Each structure stands twice: as structure tokens, then as C-alpha cells.
Image (cartoon, grey):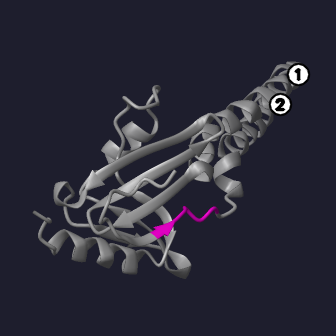
């Protein structure tokens, strides 16, 4: 199913780049290991007879699973998402096994596009939302059609060029 309306022109389409982020996925586990080793050293210095290793080591698998589960929804959404920029709107498509989910925002409803580009010209295009708002909505406990979303284009290649396409489309008058 093609989500464009009659006389709507596609200017750009793409999906988020998916870099390998080992540190972000294992941060909780790494933090627990550092704290645990520190506790073991401190307890060993003050009370060598206290066997703290057994309860601590039994928590490591729980922390590993918890750190992976925290990132699964974000990773699944990134793998399912495609962005479409047309002359009238920005369309967000999530292709799930159960079907496609479409959301869009008209250009005239969006504030000017801002780009935060990183290495290799891969960046995120934001539309005036604060980092706090993006974090709260990204970590929301609900999802689906009624969930609010932040219309940001995450981790896209050539982000500055795409943002300029959006800015140009925003300056174009709406068809009558």
C-alpha cells in the first residue's frame, strides 16, 4: 500500500541507519560489574569472612536481561520504520508483522527543521521539541495509534539535505 495522496510528490524516502552500539546495550551490565567488584573489594577488606560473591553473581544474569529488554522496543521500532518526505507532509511508516502503521504531519504544522549531524553525515532532524519531551515520549509505557509521538527523523543519511528539502516544502504555499 502506497500512502501518498493524489498529486502528492515524493521528495525523499529512507530508513534510520542502524549502527552497532555495543556500549549502550551493555551499560547496565557494565555498571553492575564495576559496582559489584568495588563492593567485593570493600567487603573483602573490612570483613573477609562475608560471602557476598554468591548473591551478587546471581544478579548478573538478571541485570543482563533487564538491560536488553529496556532497548528492545526502540530497536524494533528502528528496524520497522521508514520515513517519507513529500511536498505536503512527512510520513512515518512502521511495517510490523501484523500490518503497517502510518503517521504523518503536514509541513505547515511543523516548526522549522533543525539538524543534529554526527559522523559520516548521519544525523537526526528535529522540529522544535525539547530533549526532555523526546525522552519522555520515547520511554512511554503505551504505544499504538493513540500514543503521542515526536516527529523526529532519527539517524538518517545526508540529514542536512533532507532537512533542506523539508524547509523548502514548508515555504511552498499549500495547493488550493
Residue count near mark 2 (Cα–Cα under 10 Å), binned few <14, some 14–19, many ≥20 = some
Dominant secondary structure of the magenta stretch?
A: loop
Q: Which residues are magenta?
A: 13-18
Q: CA distance from mark 2 to mark 1?
A: 14 Å
Looking at the image, the residue that sits furthest to the front is: 6
User: What residue is disc 1 on?
Assistant: 54
Towards the viewer: 119 or 96: 96
Q: Please state if 107 lies on the left or on the right of 27 as rendered.
A: left
Instruction: Identify the image quadrant of residue 140.
Output: top left
Tell whether 132 sits left or right of 106. right
Q: Quick one: SS at disc 1? A: helix
Near-viewer residue (101 or 132): 101
**What residue does disc 2 label?**
44
Q: Quadrant of residue 33?
A: top right
N-terminal of the pair, mark 2 or mark 1, is 2
* Whole-percent x, y for residue 172 in the image: 16, 74
Q: Is residue 11 left or right of residue 170?
A: right
In the rendered image, residue 52 lying in the magenta stretch gets the answer no
Q: Position of residue 162 (x, y in %)?
A: 38, 75
**Quadrant placement of the C terminus:** bottom left
Amino acid at each position: 500500500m502506497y500512502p501518498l495522496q493524489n498529486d502528492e510528490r515524493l521528495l525523499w524516502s529512507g530508513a534510520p541507519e542502524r549502527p552497532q552500539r555495543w556500549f549502550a546495550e551493555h551499560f547496565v551490565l557494565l555498571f553492575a560489574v564495576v559496582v559489584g567488584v568495588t563492593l567485593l573489594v570493600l567487603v573483602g577488606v573490612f570483613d573477609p569472612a562475608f560471602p557476598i560473591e554468591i548473591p551478587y553473581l546471581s544478579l548478573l544474569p538478571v541485570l543482563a536481561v533487564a538491560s536488553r529488554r529496556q532497548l528492545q522496543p526502540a530497536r524494533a521500532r528502528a528496524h520497522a520504520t521508514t520515513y517519507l518526505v513529500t511536498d505536503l507532509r512527512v510520513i512515518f511508516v512502521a511495517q510490523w508483522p501484523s500490518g503497517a502503521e502510518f503517521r504523518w504531519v503536514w509541513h505547515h504544522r511543523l516548526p522549522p527543521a533543525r539538524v543534529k549531524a554526527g559522523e559520516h553525515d548521519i544525523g537526526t532532524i528535529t522540529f522544535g521539541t525539547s530533549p526532555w519531551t523526546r525522552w519522555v515520549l520515547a520511554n512511554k509505557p503505551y504505544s499504538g495509534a493513540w500514543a503521542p509521538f515526536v516527529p523526529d527523523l532519527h539517524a538518517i543519511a545526508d540529514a542536512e539535505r533532507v532537512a533542506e528539502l523539508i524547509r523548502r516544502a514548508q515555504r511552498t504555499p499549500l495547493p488550493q
